[in-house]
Amino acid sequence: MDALLGTLAEAELAVVREVQPDRLIGLDEDELIALHARVRRHRDKYVKQYRRQAAASIEPAGGRGKAHARNSRARAKAELFENILAGVSRLLAVAAQASADALHAERLADEQPRFAPPPPAPAPAKVTRLPRQRSTTRPDSPDLQKRRASTRATNARRQARRDST
């Protein structure tokens, strides 16, 4: 690990130092987002570098297995920043959830009335039922049949007009 840290540039070492647990404690959500972006940039840089070098060294080495060992430093750096990114992501998720909970509590507090609650409503009076509505005394009466036929014809004419346009 110390050998790997010795190969990092100063900007990368600054990011590694910044993710020490004692420095992460006081960071708010915005600062964690900025740190997350910086760590992701470094991780993406070394992942790209590792993939490009691995692809370029396959042909001269004679295969992927033989080329694997030649690219170990870029792979180790990519893995280091991937682990750091995972830790920062976890902290960012916790901070984002805490922020969301605080906003939710604030919104609920704003929705509460600022005055005394209204007195309780009086008990409901006894419900009286309305008499059942009768559809007809004779369900197959000629009058009812005529109304049904008229409704069907009206609907058929309406549909025919729509279909013709």
Image (tube, rainbow, N blue to C red):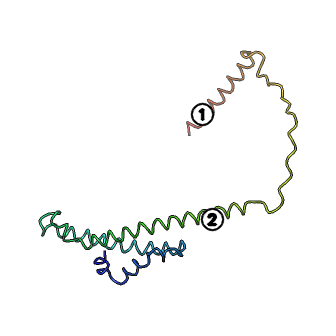
Task: State the residue in front, 159 or 41.
Answer: 41
Q: Residue at x 41, y 79 (%)?
A: 17
160 relative to 8 in the view: left or right: right
75 relative to 57 in the view: left or right: right
Residue named by callout 1: 159
Residue 15 on image: x %, y %: 40, 78
Q: Residue at x 13, y 68 (%)?
A: 61
Label 2 crowd (10 A; few <14 / some 14-19 / many >=20):
few
Q: Residue at x 68, y 27 (%)?
A: 151
Residue named by callout 2: 102
Q: Quadrant of the N terminus?
A: bottom left
Q: Disc 2 marks which amino acid?
A: Ala
Q: Residue at x 73, y 20 (%)?
A: 144
Picture quadrant of residue 149:
top right
Query: In this picture, is 122 found above or below 110?
Result: above
Query: In this picture, is 36 found above or below 111?
Result: below
